[in-house]
Image (cartoon, coloured by chain):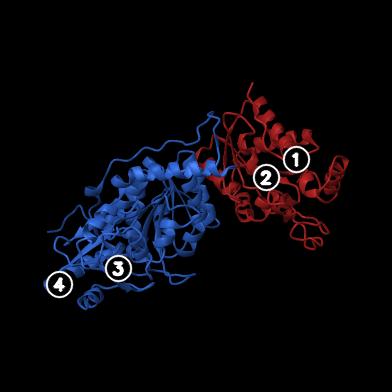
Chain colours: A blue, B red
Amino acid sequence: MYDVKKKFMTGAEIATQAAIDFGADTMYGYPITPVTEVFTNWIKQGQKYLQTEDEIAAGFAVCGAVMAGQKAFTATSGPGHILMQDALSMAEGMRLPFVAIVAQRGGPSSGTVIYSQQETTLACFGGNGEGLRLVYSPGTLAELYTLIRRAFNESWQYRFPAIILTDGYTVKTRGLVDLENLKVENVASAPLVKEGEIKHWPNIFTFEEELYTEVMKSKADFDKITAGVATAEEYQTEDAEILLIAHGIVGAATKVAVDQLREADKKVGLFRPITLRPLAVPQLNSIAKKVKKIVFIESSLGQLARIIKDELSPGVGASFEYLQCPGLGIEIEEIVNQVSKF
Amino acid sequence: MPEYIPAKFCAGCGYPIILMTLGRILEQKQLSKKAVMGLDIGCSLLAINALPINIFHTHHGRVTPTMLGFKRARPDSLCFGLTGDGGAYAIGWQSLFHSALRDEPITVIVVNNTVYAMTGGQTAPTTLPGQKTDTNPNGYDGATFFGPESLRHITHKDAYLARTAANNPKDIATYIEKAIATQSAGHFSLVEILSFCPTNWKTVGKATMDYVENLKKVYKVGEI
């Protein structure tokens, strides 16, 4: 039966709708494939925007806007994401609710224009800071919507910059989604610099101890929210001997591969981090401790694997295997074929 | 009376004169509450507690886009970007140029001392031919950059561009007042102020004043 609530939308349209539903007030952007449509859809919806001269200006305009209390955001990719790290670093240092939708494209350099998972390290740990930012990795179109809503809410609530790390396949895919069932309450915005307040707000310090105190306070705040923010999907892990770890749309493909491998009596399960920063570490380790083998599957040369391995507890005795295709899409069949050999 | 906290500028620096002048204007016009000043990184960062208004740091070269974001979010605020000649005309030029082109209603105050002062006196776009700097120890042999004159070609007819010097506080006051009026009228404004840097110029007393007077022969003061 046809479900009238469902709409046939592209990822870019869904991203735009999520920002509108949050009540985002303005977007600063610079066109770059594959994320341009998020910007142009936003504009076609009659929303406020500015096309800046580069991603640096877009990023810093967002910084200024959120300091004034405006729900502003941006979207970028690849080389633009590199430039955006300048502003993201300020947002991390000053704890600004800076929201960026990043659709990964191939790298290094200008690479390819549609797809990769090679901006994972950059999103999580870019900038000259400590990676105190929220990074969400949607696997599906519906999740793209829910995670953008979460990113806006949690960024304004906890005041850490937030990146929704997706890719060109996701933003250009058109699919049926029921956004009505995904609606959530919005966190209110508030000016961080108020008229008449006389606030002197530094982000450069004279003494090492001053900066140390700032960073450690942010670290403590980040640790405090981790249990509530860190999210991951686990699938068929109860009796799994082989744990597949993948994120984003590779994670979604891996989930289907798990079903097919199970049909062939392969005891596999999936751990799919939904937030890459912060990572659901206790959940990861409770599963990882029980398996004999961990297979990292990603469209990069180990960017996810490094993030995960850094958090594995010493009690994890599993051996590691890798399916790494930098800048290349990974199909279900390939995952099934490769994992069947392990 | 608002409390003026002494900032950490070098002895003989021109910044305190500029900041005190700005502060006095804001106080006289009762604009202190509406004023928001972003600081570029360089000597400008030392102004963080110089005035009883909202002030915050940004990044080097990034004060202009940060302030236009603030201004667009709060059109009733009075937005200043305080920057050096390097932040304005080198690393921040692309943003400054396009903000001027779009006629963003913000006021940029450029303190031009012809060097990158905070980092020890390296060549800036405003360094004069023959001037010895940390990165041109045998004398600078490149071209000299004229910020307000360059912007005049692309700015709106009602945008305000002017240049004065730290030893002309009356003109600083007049030009900043006009820049504020321009911002209030919805247009871009920039005031460049030729400023003392005895630390990097390696000058004392009268020699510092003579240095600025010589600069005025190259960088014409007045409305542009």
Total marks in image? 4
Q: In this orientation, does residue A40 appear?
A: no
Q: Which residue is mark 2?
A: B43
Report the amino acid beneath label 3. Answer: Phe
Seen from the viewer's position, the closer of residues A37 and B213 is B213
Q: Amino acid at mark 4?
A: Lys
Same subunit: marks 4 and 3: yes
**A241 vs B151: above or below:** below
Q: At numbered mark 4, what does the secondary structure look like: helix, strand or loop?
A: loop
Q: Quadrant of the C terminus of chain A?
A: bottom left
Residue topped by disc 3: A296
Q: Nearer the viewer, residue A253 or A245?
A: A245
Sequence-wise first label, 4 or 3: 4
Spatial CA distance of label 3 from label 1 is 58 Å
Q: Chain of mark 3?
A: A
Residue marked by disc 1? B13
Amino acid under label 2?
A: Cys
Same subunit, tags 4 and 2: no
Q: Secondary structure at mark 2?
A: helix
Closer to the observer: label 4 or label 1? 4
Residue B158 sits in quarter: top right
Q: Which mark is residue A253?
A: none
Label 4, label 2: how far apart the Cα atoms are: 64 Å
Kindly identify which numbered label has been placed on residue A266. 4
What is the x, y in percent for residue A313?
A: 29, 58
Whether pointer 1 and pointer 2 mark residues with C-beta atoms closer than 8 Å, the reply is yes
